[in-house]
Structures are given as structure tokens and as C-alpha cells.
Amino acid sequence: MVISVDEKTSVGTLLHPLRIGSLELRRNLLLSPICGVSNSAHRILCKEHGAALVFTEMTKAKMLGEENEKTLSLASYFPEEHPVGIQLGGGDPDDMEEGARIAEGMGFDIVDVNSGCPARKVTKQLEGVALMSDPALVGRIIERMVRAVSIPVTIKVRLGLTHESINAKEVARVAVSAGAKMVTIHGRTAQQGYSGTSDWERIAEIKAALCDAIVIGNGDVRSPEDAKSRMKQSGVDGVMIGRGSFGNPWIFDQIAHYLEHGTHLPGPTIDERRETLFRHYEILGQIYEERTQHIVMRRIASYYTQGLPFATSLRRFAQKIRLAEDVHFLANNFFTAEFVERPREVLAKAGVVPDETPEPCEDELATCS
């Protein structure tokens, strides 16, 4: 059954401040933790364009306790990211308790439990979405973490492992009873991965069952219209945006404006897209050594090509990025008004062989949030 908010409710009331335990947010639009994407560069840009709360990539609690260098890098952030949360992965209550304690000491404003990652390398260790197979364990983990820290503890889950074993409602109830201050529901099963569509009817049912808890919906929010329809359909307290923000940090302000006024903000100009691409690249240089910066930039630059003519050709070029000169060549040749107006001519001048069609293809790079 679909649970809808009152049809008489004005669009503007869908956008509102959000209180998660002791943490107060100015609006109910959140950035999802996304493996391989939600580093500080992505978080800062999304925060500047309206995300009220951002999260790190999933960080292994056990490795955090062992002061693993790579893990500590994942858990680093800049002051301007506040309020910022860390998402911890793990299946051992001791590790998760200690991880939460360390996270609070690092200055994080909130700590989230990853019970949604469907990646095999995570689930084979009975972590991520595999935690949903043992709701009692989820409850013990949350309870231990809540007792250990004063910052809010939250959890992100999927609908279940398969369509035959959907138990998000049970897991959410257990988590809230154990002290979780917010539950985020991704409307797919682990078996689906990122295929199919997010089931917002199921999310609506969970919100109805947990009417006094903060429930955030996640999945397939790629436009202001998506956000409005999902929020009205489900009655959730807010939305968490993941793939919709890839190469599009502007989506948060666009959604906020649409929910508040019912009209659209103009999209970013091609010059704004180019400057944002450069800024993303520059911040990556502050958090990674040069080789890793360029490896990460291959994926990031591909996202920014969405909507441009011959996007597939541009993606192929982006996958070859190895030097700063490659980034500047891509941005200064193809993120220009001239390219938008005369793409074949610019491609030929740049020595890039175009595809048969100028239509951009939707990016389907998978993540593990």
C-alpha cells in the first residue's frame, strides 16, 4: 500500500529542517555515502550546493581501530564539511563500538552503520547488507555504539537480501529500539544491486510502521521532480541522494528550490560545469598523491560529461587521463560553448574520433553504498 502525505500539503512543506538526535540540519536533503565517489572533493561540492549532511565512504571499523593508513585517509575530512558523518562497516560489536568511539574523537557529528552495501567483497565477511540476515546482531551493534558515544548513531539498510527475504521493517524496528536516531532505506534488495527500480511503496510502508522515527528514503532520486514525487508518495522525513549527485552537485539546491517554490532553478552553464570540474580535480589533489588523483579523476570526469554531445567519446578520452594536461585538454576543449554548438568540428580539431551518434549515454558505473 502506498502511504501518501495529504494532497493538500503545499510543496514547500516537503522541505524542512531535520533534527537527528542532538544534530540539527537546515534541510532534509542528504548526500549518500558512496564507495569510490564520496571523498572530500565530492562532499565539499555537494555541501556548497545544498546538501545538509554528507558522509564519508564506508570505513572499516576494525581497520580504523588498527590505525590503518588507507582507512584513516578514507576517514579524513575538511572543516568546511561539517556537519559530516562517517559510515562504519563491520559485523563485530566490539569493533563497531571502538570505531564509533574513535569517530567521535575525530570530530564527526554522526556515525552511520553500513547495512546496505551489496558488494561481494563486503558481504562475504558478513558485513554490509549481510548484517540484515541477523537483526539481533544489528541490535547489539547499535546498542553498543549508542552507549559508547554522545553523537547520534544511525543505520542505512536495503529492503532485504532478496525479494523472498525482505525484512527492512524488522531490521529498522530493531535498530530504532536499540537507539538508532535515523534509518535510511535504499529501496532495492541486495540481489538487485543497482538494477531495476527503487521500491518506494516498500519505503512508504516502513515509514508508516515507524511513524515516530526519522526515516530517510534513498534510490532513484535524480531530479527535483523525483524528490517531490518520492517524498509525497512515501511520507519520509527526507531523501538521501547518491548516484543523482554524480557530476551534478547542483542537484541539492535544485531540489530545495523546486520543493520550496515549485519552479526550477536554471541549470549550470557550461562555464560553471568546467570550473566545477577543475575545482573537483584540485581538491582531489589535496587528498591523494598524483597517480591516485588521476585514476580517481577518470571516473569523476566521466560523470561530468553527462548531457554533453558525444558523451561516450568524451568518456573514452576521460578514461585515459594520466596527467594534469589531460584534464585541462578535456575541460578546455569540450566543456565550452563552442563544443556544445559545433561538437563534430571541435572533436575533429582535437583529434578525437566521434561516435556515430551525438546522444549522450547514461552513466551506469556501479557503487557500493
Image (cartoon, grey):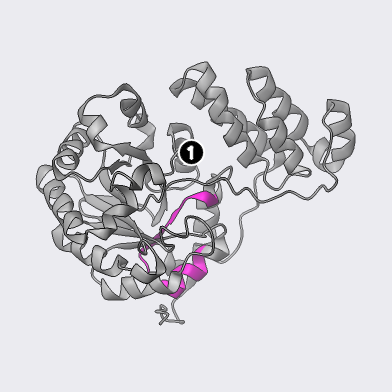
**Any magenta on residue 230?**
yes
Q: Is residue 265 left or right of residue 252?
A: right
Expressed as whole percent of the image width and height from the top left, the position of residue 246 reads 55, 44
In front: 24, or 345? Answer: 345
Expressed as whole percent of the image width and height from the top left, the position of residue 188 reads 44, 62
Q: Residue at x 78, y 50 (%)?
A: 359
Check disc 1 and report the residue beneath it: 37
Q: Residue at x 43, y 40 (%)?
A: 35
In front: 78, or 369? Answer: 369
Circle 1 crowding by C-alpha within 10 Å: few under 14, some 14–19, many from 20? many
Q: Which residues are magenta?
A: 227-244
Expressed as whole percent of the image width and height from the top left, the position of residue 70 reads 35, 25
Does the rendering let one see residue 289?
yes
- Whether 164 is drawn above or below 50: the answer is below
Residue farthest front in this picture: 124
Q: Residue at x 68, y 18 (%)?
A: 325
Three-letter amino acid code at the position of disc 1: Val
